[in-house]
Image (cartoon, helix red, strand yellow):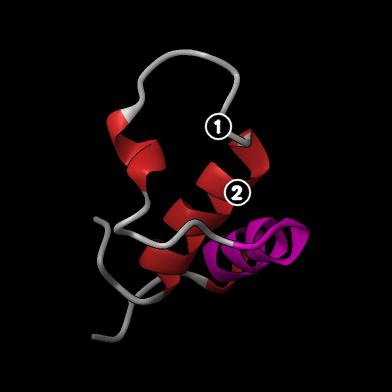
């Protein structure tokens, strides 16, 4: 699915994605809501990937 992001938004999400490897969507990290196991850069990269693929609104 293609996204309809503005150029500015696309560049922002691409910069987030360049900072870290996204988590796989089936990673157990998504069921852990506390603790220090989660890497916030990887979480943001995962959301950025989804946005660039048009799966977030």
Q: Is residue 54 toward the left or the right of residue 19 in the image? A: left
Q: In the figure, residue 40 lies in which quadrant?
A: top right
Badge 2, how many Cα within 10 Å: few under 14, some, many 20+? some
Q: Which residues are magenta?
A: 9-21
Q: Is residue 52 left or right of residue 7?
A: left
Q: Is the Cβ of the residue at disc 2 closer than 8 Å to that at disc 1?
A: yes
The x and y percentages for residue 12 are 64, 58
Q: Please name the residue shown 28% across and 32% down the image.
A: 31
Rendered image quadrant of residue 24: bottom left
Residue ID for mark 2? 42
Q: Position of residue 4 (x, y in %)?
A: 33, 76
Looking at the image, which residue sits at the far bottom? Answer: 2
32 on left or right of 42: left
* Whole-percent x, y for residue 53 in the image: 36, 77
Specify few, some or many for label 1: CA neighbours under 10 Å numbering under 14, 14-19, or 20 or more. some
What whole-number distance in Å separates the C-alpha atoms at marks 2 and 1? 8 Å
Secondary structure state at the residue bearing disc 1: loop
- Residue at left 29%, top 58%? 26
Q: Main secondary structure of the magenta part?
A: helix
Quarter assignment of residue 32: top left
Residue identified by numbered label 1: 38
Which image quadrant: the C terminus?
Answer: bottom left
Judging depth in this view, the residue of 15 and 30 nearest the camera is: 30
């Amino acid at each position: 699915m293609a996204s309809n992001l503005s150029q500015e938004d696309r560049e922002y999400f691409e910069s987030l994605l360049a900072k870290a490897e996204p988590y796989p969507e089936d990673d157990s990290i998504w069921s852990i809501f506390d603790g220090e196991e989660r890497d916030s850069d990887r979480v943001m990269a995962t959301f950025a990937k989804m946005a660039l693929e048009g799966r977030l609104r």
